[in-house]
Image (spheres, rainbow, N blue to C red):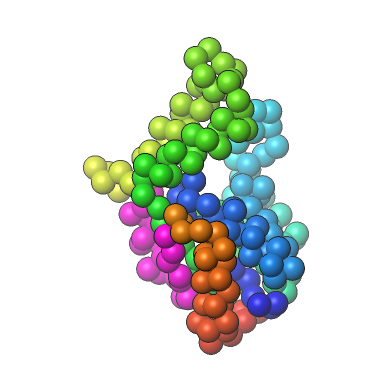
């Protein structure tokens, strides 16, 4: 797999970071999460976004030019220049209930009881969970609809996977796909 650049994306809680890290470890290539570039370092975290130009400058200075990498997270709406360097995109799908359960567990691991009534992270937790629930919203064009339109416009190969499958099977499926589909498309400069 050495020599490929891959984006692993999907809704929050689908497991894009988990799969991205596993692939990067297996292939011995760098891994980064889009959130590392998207958000300014703050306490509490994830409260202030970097300006788009700054995000892109950091990504192009520190990560994108490398010969191979795995990036996890969403670039929709601002990262077309990064996607232009990717050899393929893995899009993870997951049912909403399982995804929300994963997110609730993840938030509890990160913040403990502070997400509960009166806790220091209660408001931020509820705001985040409300935002996450809106992914599948069909009343207005939700993020899922926007992701589908974005995926349809990509010029690189896209692999869709159900992320409720075991991690080892997801890794094998992506590795096999990269050996066939992505390799057939060639490496992007």
Q: Position of residue 130 (x, y in %)?
A: 40, 32
Residue at 56% x, 16% y: name it.
119
Q: Which residues are magenta?
A: 143-162
Across and down, in percent, residue 95 comes to 36, 49
Q: Residue at x 56, y 37 (%)?
A: 106
Q: Is residue 4 above or below residue 81?
A: below
Check if residue 61 falls in the magenta segment: no
- In which quadrant of the rendered view does residue 134 lie? top left
Quarter of the figure with residue 2 = bottom right
Instruction: Name the residue located 36 percent from the left edge and 45 percent from the top edge.
Output: 96
Q: Is residue 75 above or below residue 131?
A: below
* Viewer-side residue, 185 vs 80: 185
Q: Quadrant of the C terminus?
A: bottom right
Q: Is residue 146 magenta?
A: yes
**Residue 80 appears in the figure:** no
Say if 108 sits above or below 103 in the image. above
In the image, residue 177 above or below residue 171: below
Q: Is residue 154 visible?
A: yes
Percent of width and height locating residue 62: 75, 59
* x and y percentages locating residue 71 in the rendered image: 62, 60
Q: Quadrant of the N terminus?
A: bottom right
């Amino acid at each position: 797999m050495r020599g490929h650049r891959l984006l692993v994306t999907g809704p929050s809680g689908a497991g894009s970071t988990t799969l991205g890290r596993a692939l990067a470890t297996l292939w011995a290539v760098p891994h980064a999460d889009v959130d590392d570039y998207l958000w300014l370092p703050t306490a509490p975290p994830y409260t202030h976004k970097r300006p788009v130009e700054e995000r892109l400058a950091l990504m192009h200075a520190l990560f994108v030019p490398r010969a191979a990498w795995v990036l996890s997270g969403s670039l929709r709406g601002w990262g077309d220049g990064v996607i232009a360097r990717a050899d393929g995109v893995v899009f993870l799908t997951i049912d909403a209930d399982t995804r929300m359960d994963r997110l609730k567990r993840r938030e509890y691991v990160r913040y403990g009881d502070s997400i509960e009534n009166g806790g220091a992270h209660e408001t931020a937790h509820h705001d985040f969970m409300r935002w996450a629930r809106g992914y599948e919203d069909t009343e207005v064009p939700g993020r899922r609809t926007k992701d589908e339109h974005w995926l349809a416009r990509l010029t690189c190969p896209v692999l869709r996977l159900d992320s409720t499958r075991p991690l080892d099977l997801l890794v094998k499926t992506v590795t096999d796909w990269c050996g066939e589909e992505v390799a057939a498309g060639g490496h992007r400069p």
